[in-house]
Image (cartoon, helix red, strand yellow):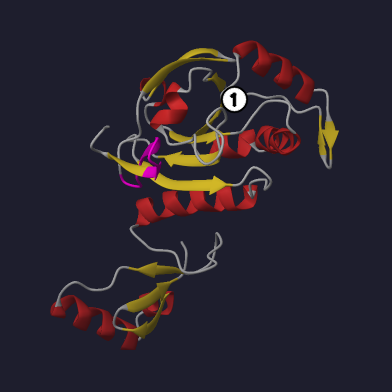
């Protein structure tokens, strides 16, 4: 087991190994519906949303692929690449993608699947990322890994097979991660883009005094801040 990953024993015969938040995302070279890809080499400088699904030609997964296809350009504008995966063959993926592009659902009509789908029939990538769990050892769970441009895992989501992913939340997480990294801020409960953010608490007595004086002053900068206590200060999103 890679010492950067955690290993969880499900029972005496089965273990699951996967990277933790803050760990380097496992590398891989695989065949996809867009040809061979190498991670992280092919995604240098990009955010990556790596997502797995239990199986091709399944109802919930089909609606998710249609939604990812609809939002593809939104993710591209956020310097983010989508990469799908399941433990199915390349030919199964190609047939399923071709079928999806002929469907209409809600406001999505004949979506074009522009992202690659990994044919992980030997479960090599799925096992590296802990995507094979629970009662089934022949399909991947519904997982999402957010990986930053340095190849570091920043967020992990898991869903049961019966529950489709919330795509507004996936985009919110991505926006939040990018904003937090860019501006060195934290995000409060129920944060949405445009809402106030939390600035880091002061780390020294001098910094604390400086912040209190700023909040009490008549400076224009003072109106950007809402100080609830010395450790809890909000700032308007820029």
Magenta region, residue range: 9-22
Residue highlighted by disc 1: 115
* Quadrant where the image shows the N terminus: top left
Give the x, y percent position of residue 6: 31, 43
* Residue at 30% across, 36% down: 24
* Residue at 57% across, 14% down: 34
Q: Nearer the viewer, residue 40 or 209?
A: 40
Circle 1 — which element?
Answer: loop
Q: Residue furthest front?
A: 12
Residue 54 lies in quadrant: top right
* Residue at 75% across, 17% down: 98
Q: Nearer the viewer, residue 151 or 178?
A: 151
10 in the magenta segment: yes
168 in the magenta segment: no
Magenta stretch: dominant secondary structure? strand
Give the x, y percent position of residue 203: 19, 72
């Amino acid at each position: 087991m890679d010492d950067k990953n955690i290993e969880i024993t499900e029972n005496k015969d089965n273990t699951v190994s996967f990277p933790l938040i803050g760990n380097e995302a496992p590398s891989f070279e695989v065949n996809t519906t867009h040809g061979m890809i190498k991670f992280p080499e092919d995604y240098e400088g990009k955010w990556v949303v790596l997502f797995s699904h239990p199986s091709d030609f399944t109802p919930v997964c089909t609606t998710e692929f249609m939604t990812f296809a609809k939002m593809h350009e939104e993710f591209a504008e956020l310097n983010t690449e989508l990469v799908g995966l399941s433990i199915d063959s390349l030919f199964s993926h190609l047939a399923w993608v071709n079928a999806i592009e002929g469907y209409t659902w809600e406001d999505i009509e004949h979506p074009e699947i522009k992202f690659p789908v990994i044919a992980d029939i030997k479960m090599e990538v799925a096992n590296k990322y802990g995507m094979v769990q629970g009662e089934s050892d022949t399909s991947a769970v519904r997982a999402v890994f957010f990986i930053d441009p340095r190849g570091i895992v920043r967020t992990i989501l898991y869903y049961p097979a019966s529950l489709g992913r919330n795509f507004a939340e996936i985009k919110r997480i991505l926006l939040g991660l990018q904003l937090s990294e860019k501006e060195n801020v934290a995000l409060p409960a129920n944060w949405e883009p445009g809402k106030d953010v939390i600035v880091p608490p002061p780390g020294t007595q001098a910094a604390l005094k400086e912040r209190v004086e700023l909040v009490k002053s008549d400076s224009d900068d003072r109106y950007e801040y809402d100080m609830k206590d010395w450790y809890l200060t909000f700032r308007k999103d820029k």
